Image (tube, helix red, strand yellow):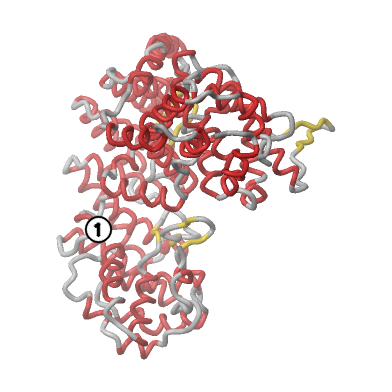
């Protein structure tokens, strides 16, 4: 959420906080006893201070809270400070929100801060917004280098206890310093200190056999052409071999990859190819260590084959790996069909059963159709991010998703990759989060209530058809199809329910868009076709958003379209699902969700509709 949603006037954005007011406020003293130089930590401290201040002092702390609350992404040279959060069209503040006059006022005080992290952030933002502020840019550069020196000397700490300049957090600072130096003239004498620091840290990481640190610093060293490429290659290859022998296959692969790039930069193609082959071997061995998980094993073998594909003389090896991959893929279906999470659903089931047992059919059916709705996307993503803070490895690790036949349909490099990939990874984690919630809803509510309704009531097909014909979501002459689908769902006949209902979803979306005068046809080479579900949720998201709450569109995307999730539309449309897997909780929940959406327009007058068709 943007600050504007909570406060009418935002300091620095709606009005200017002047330099003399900043100097008169004790921002620096609040941070004087803080060891951390990381803006993540500084932001938390400043946030607490806001609550204890009022008037102009409060505005100063709000301004600096915003300055430290940017998403630091130094790999993006043009936009290194993004919003910390984006939800439902709103976002937290970014440097471009600041008034020009506020930048001028910050320029007057950016050198006054003793905390090197705060000094670097403020001066960097000033220079980023106004490149004429050369002094601020140089101050930002010197502050970043000072921060790196403090880390190296053991006189500073970053968020979550990181203390090394070649740690993941330290490398971010180094990357930003490199961007500033490059923009101002990389070869100039003012930036020699940084070049020396990179060279020294690369040597230090190699001598200390710090594989993680060497991988990070060597990548920057190679990119900025500080040390000789041949030296970088030999160091990474040597440490890669050590880690391979120690069965640290992931680290070894990363080092081999850097070595390959360095060898190519040094025009040593044969040595580079050897490193790529070694990286492929790391993937194969990593997969074999995870043979208990057929899905993981297959993912690593698939990647190894892709590594070898451009390499000459690897055809025989690739064919052998293909044979191994095919044998592993045959086991994936069994693996995915037996994964379970032990949960005590007794209370949930008892509550669901009591809500419909011995109740009139209309009341029981209403309980079944409206027992829940999907979460709002902002709440869902907030919960996902909290889980990421508790278990950060789940966000950092790359993932590969297979369909019901064991084929790779989605890959994500993890949260530490580029912005688009990180967004896809977050969406994948949201899908995983919802998967468990759907499992609970299906096992604890949908199936038990369905059993009670079919046990205690006579379900008249004509009555259900008449009821659903009142829904604007259901096209004319399609109510019978929906009714049959609902009856099959209540009766536990998932194959029939899914086969009837899932194809109706995109047709109903086209139908409601047509009611709004939206043309959903797609023209290609003069031929008109109807938009698919994927196209509807993509190209017509805005129009659909005027009809449905965003939580429904997001859930439909996660459940039916997103390849990192169940992707039910694609799986069902192409006949990929085995008969026994139609009882998967996502398929059952998906059928329920379609009926739920269809009946939402009926909820306000449910009793009237039920009475009109004679449903007790």
Q: Is residue 466 left or right of residue 498?
A: right
Look at the picture and state if 87 lies above or below 468: below
Is residue 261 visible to us here? no
Residue positioned 34% across, 85% down in the render: 22
Residue 409 position within the rendered picture, expressed as x and y whole percent measured from the top left: 50, 27
Look at the picture and state if 44 lies above or below 234: below
Residue 113 position within the rendered picture, expressed as x and y whole percent measured from the top left: 28, 78
Q: How many marks?
A: 1
Residue at the far right: name it.
Answer: 526
Q: Is residue 578 left or right of residue 299?
A: right
Residue positioned 66% across, 32% down in the render: 466
Look at the picture and state if 83 lies above or below 129: above
Residue positioned 33% across, 37% down in the render: 351
Q: Nearer the viewer, residue 431 or 495?
A: 495
According to the picture, the residue beneath numbered tag 1 turns out to be 159
Q: Quadrant of the N terminus?
A: bottom left
Q: Secondary structure at mark 1?
A: helix
Residue 438 position within the rendered picture, expressed as x and y whole percent measured from the top left: 41, 34
Q: Residue 602: name its quadrant.
A: top right
Q: Residue 595: name its quadrant.
A: top right
Q: Nearer the viewer, residue 219 or 382?
A: 382
The local crowd at label 1, few if under 14, some if 14 to 19, many if 20 or more residues have their Cα within 10 Å, is some
Q: Is residue 564 left or right of residue 388?
A: right
Residue 21 position within the rendered picture, expressed as x and y whole percent measured from the top left: 36, 89
Is residue 19 visible to us here? yes
Q: Quadrant of the C terminus?
A: top right
Q: Nearer the viewer, residue 187 or 379?
A: 379
């Amino acid at each position: 959420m943007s600050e504007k949603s909570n406060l009418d006037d935002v300091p620095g954005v709606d009005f200017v906080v002047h330099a003399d007011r900043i100097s008169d406020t004790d921002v620096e003293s609040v941070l004087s006893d803080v060891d951390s130089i990381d803006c993540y930590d500084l932001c938390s401290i400043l946030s607490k201070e806001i609550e204890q201040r009022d008037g102009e002092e409060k505005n100063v702390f709000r301004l600096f809270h915003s300055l430290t609350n940017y998403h630091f992404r130094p790999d993006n040279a043009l936009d290194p400070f993004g919003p910390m959060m984006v939800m439902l069209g709103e976002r937290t503040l970014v440097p471009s929100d600041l008034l020009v006059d506020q930048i001028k006022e910050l320029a007057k005080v950016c050198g006054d801060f003793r905390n090197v992290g705060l000094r670097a952030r403020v001066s960097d933002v000033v220079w980023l917004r106004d490149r004429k502020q050369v002094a601020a840019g140089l101050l930002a550069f010197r502050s970043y280098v000072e921060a790196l020196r403090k880390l190296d000397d053991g006189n500073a700490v970053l968020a979550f206890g990181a203390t090394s300049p070649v740690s993941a957090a330290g490398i971010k600072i180094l990357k930003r310093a490199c961007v500033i130096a490059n923009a101002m003239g990389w070869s100039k004498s003012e930036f020699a200190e940084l070049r020396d620091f990179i060279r020294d840290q690369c040597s230090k990481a190699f001598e200390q056999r710090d594989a993680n640190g060497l991988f990070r610093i060597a990548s920057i060293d190679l990119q900025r052409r500080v040390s000789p490429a041949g030296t970088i290659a030999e160091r990474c290859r040597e440490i890669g071999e050590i880690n391979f022998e120690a069965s640290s296959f992931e680290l070894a692969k990363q080092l081999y990859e850097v070595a390959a790039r360095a060898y190519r930069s040094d025009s040593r193609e044969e040595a580079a190819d050897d490193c790529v082959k070694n990286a492929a071997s790391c993937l194969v061995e990593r997969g074999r260590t995870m043979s208990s998980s057929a899905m993981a094993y297959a993912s690593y073998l698939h990647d190894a084959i892709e590594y070898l594909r451009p390499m000459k003389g690897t055809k025989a090896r690739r064919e052998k790996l293909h044979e191994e991959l095919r044998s592993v893929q045959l086991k994936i279906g069994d693996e995915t069909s037996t994964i379970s999470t032990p949960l005590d659903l007794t209370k949930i089931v008892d509550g669901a059963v009591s809500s419909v047992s011995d109740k009139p059919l209309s009341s029981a059916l209403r309980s079944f159709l409206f027992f829940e709705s999907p979460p709002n996307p902002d709440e869902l993503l907030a919960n996902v991010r909290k889980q990421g803070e508790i278990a950060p490895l789940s966000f950092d690790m790359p993932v590969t998703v297979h369909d019901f036949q064991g084929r790779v349909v989605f890959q994500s490099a993890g949260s530490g990759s580029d912005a688009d990939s990180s967004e896809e990874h977050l969406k994948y984690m949201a899908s995983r989060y919802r998967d468990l919630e759907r499992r609970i809803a299906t096992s604890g509510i949908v199936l038990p209530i369905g059993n009670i309704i079919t046990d205690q009531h006579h379900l008249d097909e004509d009555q259900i058809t008449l009821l659903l014909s009142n829904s604007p979501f259901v096209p004319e002459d399609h109510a019978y199809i929906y009714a049959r689908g609902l009856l099959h769902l209540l009766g536990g006949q998932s194959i029939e329910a899914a086969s009837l209902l899932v194809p109706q979803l995109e047709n109903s979306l086209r139908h409601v868009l047509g009611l709004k005068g939206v043309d959903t046809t797609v023209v290609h080479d003069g031929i008109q076709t109807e938009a698919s579900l994927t196209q509807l949720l993509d190209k017509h998201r805005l129009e659909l958003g005027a009809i449905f709450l965003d939580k429904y569109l997001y859930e439909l995307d996660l459940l039916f379209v997103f390849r990192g999730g169940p992707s039910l539309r694609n799986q069902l449309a192409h006949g990929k699902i085995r008969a026994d897997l139609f009882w998967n909780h996502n398929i059952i929940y998906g059928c329920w969700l379609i009926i739920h959406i269809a009946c939402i327009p009926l909820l306000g007058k449910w009793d009237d509709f039920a009475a009109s068709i004679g449903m007790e």
